[in-house]
Amino acid sequence: MMIQTARGVRDILPEEAEVWHFLEETAITLFGLYGYQEVRTPLFEKSGLFSRAVGETTDIVEKEMYTFTDRGGESLSLRPEGTASVVRAFLEAGLTRQLPWRVCYRGPMFRYERPQKGRYRQFHQLGCELLGPAGPLADAEQMAMILDYLRRVGLGEGLTLEINSLGCGACRPGYREGLVGYLRSVPGDAGSPLCENCRRRLRENPLRVLDCKLPECRAVAARAPVMRDHLCPPCADHFRGLVAELEGLALPYVLNPLMVRGLDYYTRTAFEVTTTRLGAQNAVAAGGRYDSLVAQLGGPEVPAIGFAMGLERLALLLAESPRAAAAPAAYVVAVGEAAELLGARVAASLRGAGLRVVADLMGGSMKSQMKRADRSGAPVTLILGEEEAAKGQVMVKNMAARTQRILAWEEVLPYLDTPSVRGG
Ligand code: HAM
């Protein structure tokens, strides 16, 4: 019996890894233009960090964390998200006077969820956190940056920016009480019309009832009082400011009063960028403000906002809009020892000039090597036999035009660099 991957995790095979490199490098470069620098935090943390930051009664902490006791008796958890670790690192490094602090990160996160298209147990996020600025300008800058990024990687179509305000410690408790009153008062055939999960949420985390996906709960949520009508004056000002900024930047948005997010640290702005092309798992990016988290983790009051994008979801969307596969610039086919040696030399000189060159190295007949050259997608194959090797020459085959010519090996680089060859 062959051993297979555990449920909900996947291999990223080389072809897909190319797409991931593209997504990650474009992100890190673009975020850099906005002043974000990369931070790398551990894959596991003390479990208490997540229960304090993400919230004791959230699905993530209650049901989805990979928690284990290490040999020293310490309870540790694989990180289910990146924000808690970033804030911990910020405090641990004593950076509270170096505001604004802008960091980005990429890497695997772990949640024990029911796997489906776009939802995995090990998944990867690209995220940014901005600590310091309190005003809506920061919120709008991040949203603009995300949309800028999605456009640059070719995913600008069919997206919706959804925004909401979740209020703050001053106004949310009052709203929450009103919401619970409403949810308890809705009659059903046999008691509450809510699903079993939401009846439990009603006691522990009632706002989460608003984004339950089951039809019976959605019907109830649709008529529920909304947070935006219950914001305290500073939260209402912040939200108005954000809307004005988005309009000033000509960024289309949709108000979604039912978006509450699955992490407890959010205050005021919450947002998601959704697509209609991924089925149920429709959020490609999501985030919000978390103005109390730094203090909650033992630091001073530092307002902050951040987001994360799911790399698997971005890669799925890109796979639907095919890009040219990253083929090598040239493929080297060589038969005989002297030819292989010259082939290695030519390949090395081309790589020195920054070209991607793949040597066959499988041996065998010219015919079988040529088949693989064809499959590689390289526009040019460099063919070396005994005769070419003896003369220091290379037969250069243009795979699309099916033409070939003999060049001295030093002439191969200038030839590959001509526009008609580079263009395929
Ligand atoms: P989140 O909404 O839990 O937020 O996750 C952000 C994004 O990660 C989602 O929109 C989705 O694209 C991706 N994602 C989440 N879970 C999975 C999964 N099981 N499989 C595949 N992709 C997934 C956070 O994690 C916050 N830390 C975001 C944030 C940063 N807020 C402030 N700063």
Image: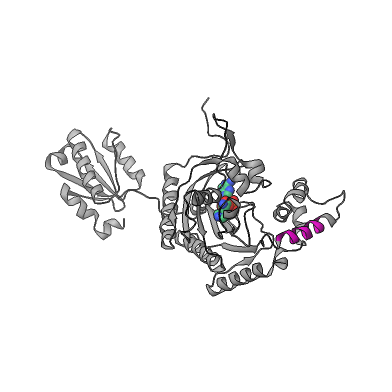
Q: Nearer the viewer, residue 142 or 333?
A: 142
Does 245 sit above or below residue 148? below
| Magenta stretch holds residue 177 | yes
* Residue sitting at x 27%, y 33%: 363
Q: Is residue 221 visible?
A: yes
Q: Is residue 242 left or right of residue 105?
A: right
The span picked out in magenta is 172-183
Q: Position of residue 54 (x, y in %)?
A: 62, 49
| Magenta stretch holds residue 388 | no
Q: Position of residue 290 (x, y in %)?
A: 59, 57
Name the quadrant of the C terminus: bottom left
Does 52 sit above or below residue 360? below
Quarter location, residue 220: bottom right
Q: Position of residue 177 (x, y in %)?
A: 78, 58
* Residue sitting at x 56%, y 34%: 6
Quarter location, residue 272: bottom right
Q: Is residue 235 left or right of residue 29?
A: right
Q: Is residue 323 left or right of residue 236?
A: left
Does 338 sit above or below residue 376? above
Q: Is residue 117 visible?
A: no
Q: Nearer the viewer, residue 386 or 179?
A: 179
Give the overall secondary structure of the magenta segment. Answer: helix
The count of marks equals 0
Q: Residue furthest left?
A: 391
